Amino acid sequence: MKKFMLSLLLAACALTLAAQTEYKASLFGCMSDGVTLNTRSIQTAINTISSQGGGMLHFYVGRYLTGTVFLKDNVTIVLHEGATLVGVPSIYDYVAPSNAPKGIIVAEGQKNIGVVGSTPERELNTNVVGSGIIQGQGALLTENAQAQLAKGYLAKTSGQISPALISFSGCTGVKVTGLMLQGAAGDVVALKGCTDVEVARLLVDSRETLGCNGIVADGCKNLTLTDNFIHVSGSAIQALQSKGVKVKNNKTPKGKL
Amino acid sequence: MYKKTFLLCLFGACCMMQVAAGEYNASLFGIKSNGTTLNTRSIQKAIDHISENGGGTLHFYVGRYLTGTITLKSNVTIHLHEGAILLGSTNPYDYEQVAHNLTFIGAYRAENIAVIGQGVIDGQGRELAYNFLDQQQKGIIKGSTTYDRAGVRSKGVYLRECKNVTFRGVTVKNGADWTFVPDQCEDMLVDSVAVIGHAFWNNDGIDIVDCKNFKLLHSFVDAADDAICFKSHDANAASDNVEVRSCVARSSASAIKFGTVSAGGYKNIRIINNKVYNTHRSAITIAIPDGGYAENILIDSLYAYNTSNAIYLRIGARNTSRPVGTLKNVTIQNLYCEIPEAKADAAYPYEGPIEDNPRNISPASIVGLAGGHNIENVTLRNITLVYPGGGSPYYAHRGLSPAELDSIPEMPRSYPEFSQFVELPAWAFWVRHAKNVIFENITLKAKAYDYRPAIVIQESDGITLRNVLYDEPDKRKKQLHTYKTTNIVQE
């Protein structure tokens, strides 16, 4: 327990440190118009921020179209109220981290990473519920991917055509909080072998594709899932072979989980 | 006989010559239609010349006429023939202020001006706005970058204190900021015009700011921000005698909006026989958040489809140095509105943001302020609102207990928006701080069960409900809940 507290404290310190450097998305040429594909701009932003010691990448109101971006050490993506990361509906724009499904925001083996909702009016790290949005356009993406499968250009490897919204593998110090998550083609949040994970205050609405699960954790350690509302076509929460799992006050349209 | 004909011919020729004296083709002034030559100075010279020589019409025929800011002058008509496009430069430094407003087309204290024809004014606002942002980020242009956008941008058309103005037939589109802004103009007619503003954020459609004797007829307005929008920027001015008739509006904010800034006021406004569709916020918003007043407002025969909210009437108090404003004598009749479950403006450029979560579908609202700032004398007659229903208490919950109703915040300082209170206790209508409200021949329909009642009225006085019908799957539910409300008449 002491160790856990210590690691929490450490994580908190790291977060505060990271928070010292703030970057706006437009500095890297990201466009909020909903039609410009921003994958490379967002990736450049993440790489730059990480290589300069970490910080926060802020997205303000608007729709930012993107394919897969890889989160890097000490970078937190902040989606302010009205900001939406929109998944591009072309399967070739998605990449999978090792041992995990494809996703819009992915990471492998990174430390102190986050995707968090915020509002301009409120302080960061307060209890923001369902603010910024990640939207997968799952129905459209799946349809397009199926067409590619049918034509034979896309191999039928499992997980190929159903990207998650967030897919992290082997990461430590992960925060996914205060967001709205909509329309995943696959599972909404996929966590594989991650340690010290907080998933909280999410509003999840993902019913566009069959068997879409909400939060899927596999082989994770110190996992906290609290205060989430999850409306999905599959199961809301799956925690497989994970240790130190704390699940509290999560709801579905049918009531408390 | 010959003599008579000859005389007639002579007379005709004289007439022709007189008319011809006022008709000028753009090419006379070296204006190029190639889309690459920057024509700012040539076009301005043409307008100035015509104005200084007794007035007339400047004709643009098919072509793309690239230009920066041009200022309209008295007694000059711009005739944009079909296929002619006045094309805004994408260079921020090609723009100037007209009456303290950066704009593409401007006019200040001009009389007898007109822009007519089937042509187009295209501000190229998206490219221009990003170029403004770039110059701000480099520190050359000083301005705020709130929301990570350029604070300094140019409007599409800005007319200030002009008289006898006509816009007929043309398309005005793609301002970098608000699209079409008549400000303190008098005797103005906008007829059969298309206003299309979704090139960038905050693209209002048409902003009627403190105008008198103004008519907007047979026009189409499609905007990323408010579409047909009344504003009052001057505490000593007001919009008076304005008619909006037979128009179609689409908005990623509100379709017909009074506000947001309400420095002066609005009176004698008639909005008749209009249609609204694919609108992200309200079909009708009347907001008095900064002092000022709105009174004698008639909204008749409005049909709104796929629109997230029907009505939002609101008094706020953002400006603490002024007395709180008033909102009274409003009649809304013959309104039909369908509210969707999904996002009403999905796939439009610059979709409106999803805000104030978690919240089930919000009801139409009439919301004054505590301390006697009631919204007064509102008549709602012959209204049908169709909702999807389906509000889930597990997603968001606001019950009917006194404590829960009292705990809804007043939010006097906040931006007035129908969603601002997050979850509300009713699925169709919520009324708070109102006096003398008549509901007459009202049908409220929810397609699926909602955990809330149809109407909640609280802290109000003098409410008449006459022939109000509820159509929801749960037939036994009590659909009207009142709290701290006096003089309720049900017929």
Image (spheres, coloured by chain):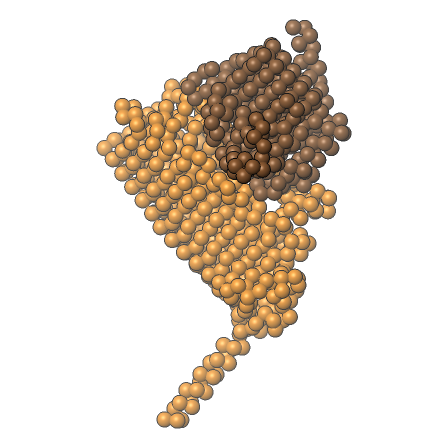
In the rendered image, the residue lying farthest to the left is B491
Write down the quadrant of residue A36 in the picture. top right
| Residue in front for this viewpoint, A176 or B132 | A176
Q: Quadrant of the C terminus of chain B?
A: top left
Give how far across and how far down residue B374 sits, in percent.
40, 34
Whether residue B46 appears in this view of the structure is yes
Seen in the picture, residue A138 relative to B345 is either above or below; the reply is: above
| Residue in the image at 62% along x and 64% along y | B34
| Residue in front for this viewpoint, B230 or B93 | B93
Give how far across and how far down residue A225 sits, in percent.
56, 16
Whether residue B48 appears in this view of the structure is no
Q: Quadrant of the N terminus of chain B?
A: bottom left
- Output the letter for the chain in orange: B
Chain A display color: brown
| Residue in front for this viewpoint, B454 or B229 | B454
Give how far across and how far down residue B309 sits, in percent.
41, 37
| Residue in the image at 36% along x and 45% along y | B303
| Residue in the image at 63% along x and 54% along y | B97
Q: How many marks?
A: 0
Q: Is A147 displayed left or right of A102 in the figure?
A: left
